[in-house]
């Protein structure tokens, strides 16, 4: 799994094995996380609030 974060567009491209790339842009959307971090929850909005402080 990989995230490509676009701060200008406030979007996150998520790359998963054997799946098409998904784009997350809606602020309240929860981002997928790896299995080892399944208890971790992060929305698009909270990610950008944290990064752009």
Image (tube, rainbow, N blue to C red):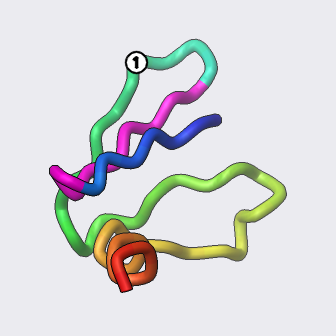
Indicate the position of residue 2 as horizontal and vertical percent values.
Answer: 59, 37
Provide the residue span drawn in magenta.
8-16
Kindly identify the residue that appears in the image at 26 percent across and 51 percent down: 11
Indicate the position of residue 44 as horizontal and vertical percent values.
Answer: 33, 66
Q: Is residue 8 left or right of residue 24?
A: left
Q: Which residue is mark 1?
A: 20
Q: Is residue 5 above or below residue 19?
A: below
Quadrant in the picture for residue 16: top right
Kindly identify the residue that appears in the image at 70 percent across and 50 percent down: 34
Q: Is residue 17 left or right of residue 25?
A: right
Kindly identify the residue that appears in the image at 71 percent across and 65 percent down: 38
The answer to if 10 sits in the magenta stretch is: yes
The quarter of the rendered structure image containing the N terminus is top right
Kindly identify the residue that appears in the image at 40 percent across and 18 percent down: 20
The secondary structure type at the circle numbered 1 is loop
The answer to if 14 sits in the magenta stretch is: yes
């Amino acid at each position: 799994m990989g995230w490509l974060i676009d701060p200008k567009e406030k979007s996150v491209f998520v790359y998963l094995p054997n799946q098409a790339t998904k784009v997350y842009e809606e602020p309240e959307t929860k981002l997928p996380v790896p299995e080892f971090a399944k208890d971790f929850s992060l929305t698009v909005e909270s990610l950008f609030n944290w990064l752009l402080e």
